[in-house]
Image (cartoon, helix red, strand yellow):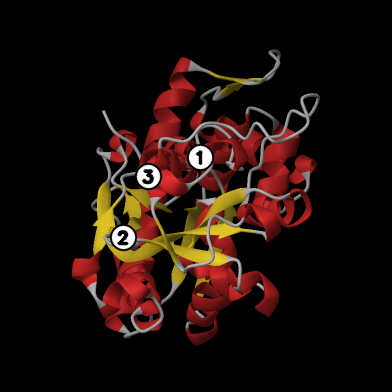
């Protein structure tokens, strides 16, 4: 019996498929099957019912998997403790990030963090808030970066990362006004492009302006955008307006930046945090990641120049 076998058991229980479990463990299916069979023979316990599709974990197997998970967690905690004693920041962190944040953080702050911490293996997935919460509950993720407060995330521990201004992006004849500051009520709600339902940034824009879907699009076009760049492209090509988080402005061309406007005071902003279950043996990595991002963004974001000029927009409400 060894640690690898326990990891293989957990993978098969998760995917309910030997082939997919083998891929996730980066080994061949015959090798994984043989290792699990050897484990079952050694304990004289049938862990998986291979006659069903998908594969079913037996009642005895469920108890074995629970114990295997505890053992793996303890081993990882032991390795983390050794790193701390050696003053080394290392380990693996499975991290989910919402799409409206990932494109701004990954190429900059997160890339810098892993470049400065070569002992850390960061596995990052772009996911919706709902998917992040499900993945945290299933153990697929260790932590998730989302817009907070978010009611469905109340069971998790939360560490604040930064506050980001919400702005308006418009183009050509559909610009809201020539001045740089606009009132929410001045926005033509029939010319707004929004992200798909369930996206927290969409919900926040709706709360600011009491918006509805864009009626300027062709009647025979059913369009659901899942990312900000697509919305910007739609505004540039078809006109209208959309909401834009402040960090996304850095990714715009010089011409596009001229299409960005502020709301009037108090400026709306959203809160970005990292959520996770506590206690966690990966707390040190999470804390250092947060500190690194905060240090980088402290002098970049408008909120920190005059916090009293801003008002928070929640991601969700009861």
Reply above or below: 201 against 211: below
- Residue 204: tell me if it is visible: no
Number of other residues with Cα within 10 Å of mark 3, as a class: few under 14, some 14 to 19, many 20 or more: some
Quick one: quadrant of the C terminus? top left
Label 1 packing within 10 angstroms: few (<14), some (14-19), many (20+): many
Marks 1 and 2, Cα distance to the nearest angstrom? 31 Å
Q: Which mark is residue 39?
A: none
Report how far apart the C-alphas of labels 3 and 2 lie in the structure.
39 Å
User: Which residue occupies the foreground of this view, 256 or 269?
Assistant: 256
Percent of width and height locating residue 12: 61, 34
Q: What residue is drawn where x is 78% and y is 31%?
A: 218
- Classify mark 3: helix, strand or loop: helix
> Which residue in the structure is indicated by mark 2?
281
* Image: 31 above or below 137: below
- Quadrant assignment, res 268: bottom left
Q: Which circle marks residue 199 in the picture?
A: 1
Nearer mark to the viewer, of 1 and 2: 1
Rendering quarter of residue 46: top right
Label 3 belongs to which residue?
208
């Amino acid at each position: 019996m060894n640690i690898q076998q326990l990891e293989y058991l957990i993978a098969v229980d998760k995917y309910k498929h030997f082939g997919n479990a083998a891929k996730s463990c980066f080994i061949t299916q015959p090798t994984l099957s043989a290792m699990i069979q050897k484990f079952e023979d050694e304990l004289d316990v049938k862990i998986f019912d291979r006659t069903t599709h998908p594969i079913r974990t037996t009642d005895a197997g469920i108890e074995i998997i629970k114990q295997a998970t505890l053992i793996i967690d303890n081993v990882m905690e032991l390795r983390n403790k050794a790193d701390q004693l050696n003053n080394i920041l290392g380990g693996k962190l499975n991290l989910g990030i919402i799409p409206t944040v990932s494109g701004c953080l990954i190429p900059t702050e997160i890339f810098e963090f892993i470049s400065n911490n070569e002992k850390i293996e960061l596995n990052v997935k772009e996911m919706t808030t709902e998917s992040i919460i499900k993945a945290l509950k299933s153990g697929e993720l260790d932590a998730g970066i989302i817009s907070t407060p978010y009611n469905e995330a109340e069971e998790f521990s939360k560490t604040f990362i930064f506050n980001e201004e919400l702005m308006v992006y418009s183009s050509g004849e559909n610009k809201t006004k020539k001045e740089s500051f606009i009132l929410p009520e001045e926005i033509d709600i029939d010319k707004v492009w929004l992200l798909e339902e369930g996206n927290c940034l969409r919900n926040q824009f709706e709360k600011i302006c009491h918006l509805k879907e864009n009626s300027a699009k062709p009647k025979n076009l059913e369009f659901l955008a899942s990312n900000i760049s697509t919305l910007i492209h739609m505004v540039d090509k078809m006109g209208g307006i959309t909401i834009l988080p402040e960090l996304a402005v850095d990714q715009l061309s010089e011409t596009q930046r001229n299409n960005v406007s502020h709301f009037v005071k108090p400026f709306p902003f959203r809160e970005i945090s990292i959520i996770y279950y506590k206690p966690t043996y990966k707390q040190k990595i999470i804390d250092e990641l947060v500190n690194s991002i905060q240090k980088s963004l402290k002098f970049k974001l408008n909120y920190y120049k005059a916090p009293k000029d801003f008002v928070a927009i929640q991601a969700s409400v009861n």
